[in-house]
Amino acid sequence: MLILKRNYFLLHGYNKYRCSIGRNGIKRFKKEGDCCTPTGKFSLGPIYFRKDKILKLKTKIRAFPITKNMYWEDNPNSKNYNKLSFNKLNSNEKLFRSDNIYDIILVINYNMNPIVPKKGSAIFIHVAKNNFIPTKGCIALRKRDLIIMISKLSKNEKILITF
């Protein structure tokens, strides 16, 4: 199990990875756009990665290459809210980015079953920005740490995010 505590470290077994979280901290009742990381215990979804930047990814979790037309729907009024989408019309969350933060994305199954509009979307574990600048609600690690961590995760791993 992955464990995230407020001290900005993600724990997995005996491994400890420095990370950043949402700029407004960890919150129990997350809402779309609040820049908070949601608290709770969640399963993990698939991995999406930039095949042009990550040549070999060792993982037991389903992994899919990111293409230029992939988005994560963050519009609460869309029928595809909080899902992978190939429609730019509604979404602002482009997965094929010019920076490196979405070179690898591990989906956290937050607000997935059922999906509740405005409860929050696109909660991922992804690559950290320089100096671990806070995220909009995701968890971000160094690229090399994320690659190592993903290689150690089992298919049915969960994440516990707590205060």
Image (cartoon, grey):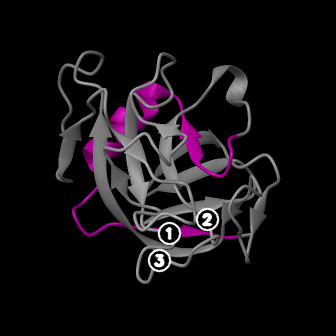
Q: Nearer the viewer, residue 35 or 159?
A: 35
Name which quarter of the figure residue 143 lies in: top left
Q: Position of residue 4 (x, y in %)?
A: 60, 59
- Does the magenta segment cover residue 139? yes
Q: Position of residue 141 (x, y in %)?
A: 54, 36
Residue placed farthest to the right in the image?
24
Which labelled disc corresponds to residue 110? 1
Q: CA distance from mark 1 to mark 2?
A: 8 Å
* Residue displayed at 79% across by 46% down: 23
Q: Which residue does the numbered mark 3 point to in the structure image?
A: 115
* Residue displayed at 55% across by 40% down: 92
Q: Nearer the viewer, residue 86 or 27?
A: 86
* Residue type of the residue flagged with mark 2: Gly
Asked if labels 1 and 3 touch by Cβ distance under 8 angstroms, the answer is no
Examine the rendered structure and indicate whether residue 59 appears above or below residue 29: above
Asked if labels 2 and 1 touch by Cβ distance under 8 angstroms, the answer is yes
Q: Which residue does the numbered mark 2 point to in the structure image?
A: 120
Q: CA distance from mark 3 to mark 1?
A: 9 Å
How packed is label 3: few (under 14 Cα within 10 Å), some, or many (20 or more)? some
